[in-house]
Amino acid sequence: MRKRLRDERGATAVEFAMILPLLLVLVLGIAEFGRAFQVSGTLSAAAREGVRVMALQNDPAAARAAVRNAATSLDPGVTDAQITITPASCPETNGGSTAVRLTIDYPMPFITDFFGASVDLTGTGVMRCNG
């Protein structure tokens, strides 16, 4: 019996070495997914804030500034080129029944380059013009 236990002494180390890469990929995947979920929430909140400013003030520059201020935690930050406002301004007529849409396209860089360089995330906000 003792000889048999002595013969299997290194088996645990070999099994651990075989499982370790899978465990590391799993942990890295959980970390990257959690960060992507947090960035997605930030983009949605920033888009909501920007479209609210656009709907109330009808000022695309102020809406873009509101988006940048709401998404300060993102690195690199959101640029004006990543923000799309449709239509470009709220019509003064029509009683405010036209909706304005603000979309943020953000290439989120990964913490590790294990899963690639980045993934494209989008935040969208829609609101009726003039409140």
Image (cartoon, helix red, strand yellow):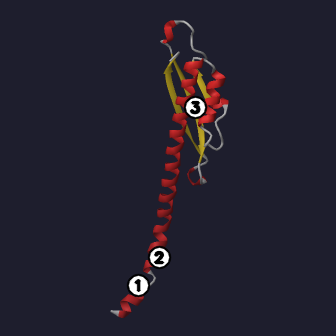
Residue designated by label 3: 104
Q: Does 56 sit above or below residue 28?
A: above
Residue at 60%, 40% (x, y): give it.
107
Look at 65% across and 29% down and name the residue there: 65
Query: Three-letter amino acid code at disc 3?
Result: Ile
Q: Tell me residue 127's x, y (percent).
A: 49, 22
Residue 122 visible in image: no
Displayed quadrant of residue 12? bottom left
* Left or right side of 4 for 34: right
In the visual, does 77 lie left or right of 42? Answer: right
Cβ–Cβ under 8 Å for marks 3 and 1: no
Which badge, 3 or 2, comes first in the chain's sequence? 2
Give the residue type at disc 1. Glu
Quadrant for the N terminus in the image: bottom left
Q: Amino acid at mark 2?
A: Val
Where on the picture, by quarter, is residue 42? Answer: top right
Q: Position of residue 36 (x, y in %)?
A: 52, 45
- Place of residue 106 in the rendered image (x, y in percent of width and height, measured from the top left): 59, 37
Residue drawn at the location 48% of the way across and 54% of the way down: 30
Assess disc 1: are there few (<14), some (14-19) or many (≥20) residues with their C-alpha within 10 Å of its C-alpha.
few
Q: Which residue is mark 2?
A: 14
Q: Is disc 3 surrounded by few (<14), some (14 to 19) or many (20+) residues within 10 Å?
A: many
Toward the viewer: 95 or 79? 95
The reply to whether discs 1 and 2 touch (Cβ–Cβ < 8 Å) is: no
Q: Where in the figure is residue 56, as x and y percent of width and height?
A: 56, 19
Q: Does residue 26 sit above or below 79 in this rendering?
A: below
Q: Alpha-carbon distance for marks 3 and 1?
A: 57 Å
Q: Which residue is mark 1?
A: 8
Nearer the observer, disc 3 or disc 1? 3
Q: Is residue 19 above or below residue 30?
A: below
Q: Residue furthest bottom?
A: 2
Task: Find the distance from the CA under tag 1 to the CA under tag 2.
Answer: 10 Å
